[in-house]
Amino acid sequence: MALWTFIADYRGGTYISQCQAPNCLAALTKWAKAFPEVRGSFIGSKTRAKLIVACRDKSERPIAIASVRNVWYWSPLGMKMVVHIIRTDGK
């Protein structure tokens, strides 16, 4: 399985984490389910629930960045979040 790095910008904070998964969509879903709750911030269980719903929406798929290899962009509608997904190792 590949290692995936997530860099998410959301409401003034930057959240960086990694997970292992066989492909980008599986990694995105795993990441969303594990998205942290940060006490004293805008991050909580409601944010995580919105991310999980967006991951399941076929119109909300990550977009591969054409000019580079193994990098995707994802911005779920209505959340004002930008996520960069990088396949850190693997094929």
Image (cartoon, rainbow, N blue to C red):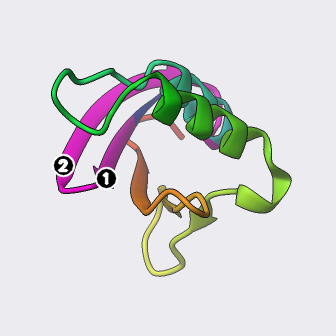
Image location of residue 42, percent across then percent down: 29, 39
Q: Is residue 34 left or right of residue 50?
A: left
Decide whether the magenta segment is chiefly helix, strand or loop: strand
Q: In the depicted view, which residue is nearer to us: 12 or 66? A: 12
Q: In the depicted view, which residue is nearer to us: 73 or 45? A: 45
Q: In the depicted view, which residue is nearer to us: 91 or 80? A: 80
SS state under label 2: strand
Q: Quarter of the image holding residue 50?
A: top right
Q: Are marks 1 and 2 in contact (CB under 8 Å)?
A: yes
**What crowding class fits label 2: few (fewer than 14 Cα within 10 Å), some (14-19), or many (20 or more)?**
few
- Residue type highlighted by circle 1: Tyr
- Residue type highlighted by circle 2: Gly
Determine if residue 23 is in view.
Answer: yes
Q: Distance from label 1 to label 2 (Cα)?
A: 5 Å
Image location of residue 4, percent across then percent down: 43, 35
Residue extending furthest right? 58
Identify which residue is drawn at 45% across, 81% down. Answer: 67
Q: Is residue 43 left or right of residue 24?
A: left
Image location of residue 84, percent across then percent down: 39, 56
What range of the chain is rendered magenta? Answer: 5-24
Image quarter hosting the N terminus: top right
| Residue 33, above or below 13 | above
Identify which residue is drawn at 46% across, 18% down. Answer: 34
| Residue 83, above or below 16 | below
Residue wearing tag 2:
13
Report if residue 19 lies within the magenta region: yes
| Residue 88, above or below 65 | above
Tag shown at residue 10:
1
Report if residue 11 lies within the magenta region: yes
